[in-house]
Image (cartoon, helix red, strand yellow):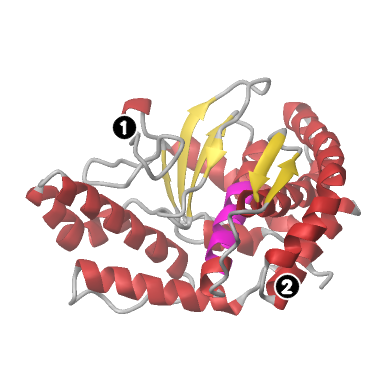
């Protein structure tokens, strides 16, 4: 499987997302709208989970007004936050730090779309769309289209600072990213978090459970990690290598320096992880998914 786009084209994921979206909307509102078409599915899938998360949080607080909003009014209200982009309808937000939620579902504060949510500035939305422009020629456009429908820009950092980016399983097709103001660097991090969302959905769609009693040394963390986290790293970081290697020739300035440094670091780390990655792949019960993960990793190693 030498074509990365083909390796990431897994029909079971779309089927899974349609079922999960339908189940979420039925739970929230039995008379909800029909399932979305293919272009709208990523955003509707993301919004269904934001509504579920928001409704659960409101119910725990016994906030019936907000619970009713998530059940009955949130659909059209949140859809109005979307803007047209190169990858279809997206929601880009940039909440303040004090709007982030600290809870048991994420090691990092996260954000749930709600009645007070406003869209990011036009400049930030344009930055995201420019990042999509860098992604488009790399063969990773469909990955980001399907797995980064809601983009939460969590803060601006200098290029020499560590950038925080993450995704959480409770909010699929949503990504959280710091940024430097450089679209090419943001493109790398959107690919990274979209990859985590893809793999989470692939494992769920194929009914695969990774044993949690196996650990492997992660050169990215400098410590042993459970197989689940290790395999995630061995999928997401190689995809950023593919992105950076293909994007670098067209990027100048600070973005070029950041991506070039990223490539140097990742080549060393992938080489250090290679043997354990081969062993960890044996824990993936589905042959087709094993081949896809292996194809991505070794394609990146060859660049």
Q: What secondary structure is found at the residue carrying circle 2?
A: helix
Q: Position of residue 268 (x, y in %)?
A: 86, 38
Q: Is residue 114 magenta?
A: no
Q: Nearer the viewer, residue 227 or 272?
A: 227
Residue indicated by mark 2: 6
Q: Nearer the viewer, residue 197 or 279?
A: 279
Q: What residue do we see at 60% from left, 60% from top? A: 211
Q: Nearer the viewer, residue 240 or 137?
A: 240
Q: What secondary structure is found at the residue carrying circle 1?
A: helix
Q: Can residue 87 be spotted in the picture? A: no
Which image quarter: residue 37? Answer: bottom left
Q: What residue do we see at 58% from left, 61% from top? A: 198
Which image quarter: residue 218? Answer: top right
Q: Can residue 280 be spotted in the picture? A: yes
What secondary structure is the stretch in magenta mostly built from? helix
Quadrant of the frame with the N terminus: bottom right
Q: What residue do we see at 33% from left, 51% from top? A: 81
Question: Residue extending furthest right?
Answer: 302
**Sequence order check, earlier mark of 2 and 1:** 2
The answer to whether 226 appears left or right of 20 in the picture is right
Q: CA distance from mark 2 to mark 1?
A: 39 Å
Q: Is residue 200 magenta?
A: yes
Magenta residues, start to end: 191-202
Residue indicated by mark 1: 99
Q: Position of residue 18 (x, y in %)?
A: 42, 76
Q: Position of residue 153 (x, y in %)?
A: 47, 37
């Amino acid at each position: 499987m030498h074509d990365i786009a083909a390796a990431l084209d897994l029909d079971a994921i779309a089927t899974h997302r349609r079922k999960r979206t339908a189940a979420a909307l039925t739970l929230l509102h039995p008379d909800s709208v029909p399932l979305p078409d293919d272009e709208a599915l990523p955003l509707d899938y993301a919004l269904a989970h934001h509504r579920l998360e928001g409704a659960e949080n409101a119910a725990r607080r016994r906030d019936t007004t907000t619970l009713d909003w998530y059940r009955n009014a949130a659909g059209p209200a949140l859809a109005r936050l979307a803007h047209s982009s190169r990858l279809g309808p997206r929601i880009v937000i940039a909440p303040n730090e004090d709007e982030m939620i600290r809870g048991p579902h994420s090691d990092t504060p996260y954000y749930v779309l709600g009645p007070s949510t406003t869209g990011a500035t036009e400049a930030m939305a344009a930055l995201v769309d420019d990042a999509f422009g860098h992604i488009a020629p790399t063969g990773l456009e469909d990955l980001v289209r399907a797995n980064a429908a809601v983009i939460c820009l969590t803060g601006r950092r200098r290029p020499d600072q560590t950038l925080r980016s993450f995704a959480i399983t409770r909010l699929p097709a949503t990504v959280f990213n710091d940024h430097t103001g450089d679209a090419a660097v943001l493109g790398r991090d959107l690919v990274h978090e979209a990859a985590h969302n893809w793999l989470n959905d692939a494992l769920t769609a194929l009914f695969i459970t990774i044993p949690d009693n196996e650990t492997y040394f992660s050169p990215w963390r400098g410590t042993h990690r459970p197989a689940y986290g290790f395999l995630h790293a061995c999928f997401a970081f190689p995809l950023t290598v593919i992105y950076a290697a293909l994007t670098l020739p067209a990027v100048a300035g600070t973005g070029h320096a950041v991506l070039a440094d990223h490539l140097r670091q990742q080549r060393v780390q992938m080489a250090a992880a290679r043997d354990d990655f081969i062993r960890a792949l044996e824990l993936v019960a589905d042959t087709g998914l094993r081949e896809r993960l292996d194809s991505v990793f070794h394609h990146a190693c060859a660049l």
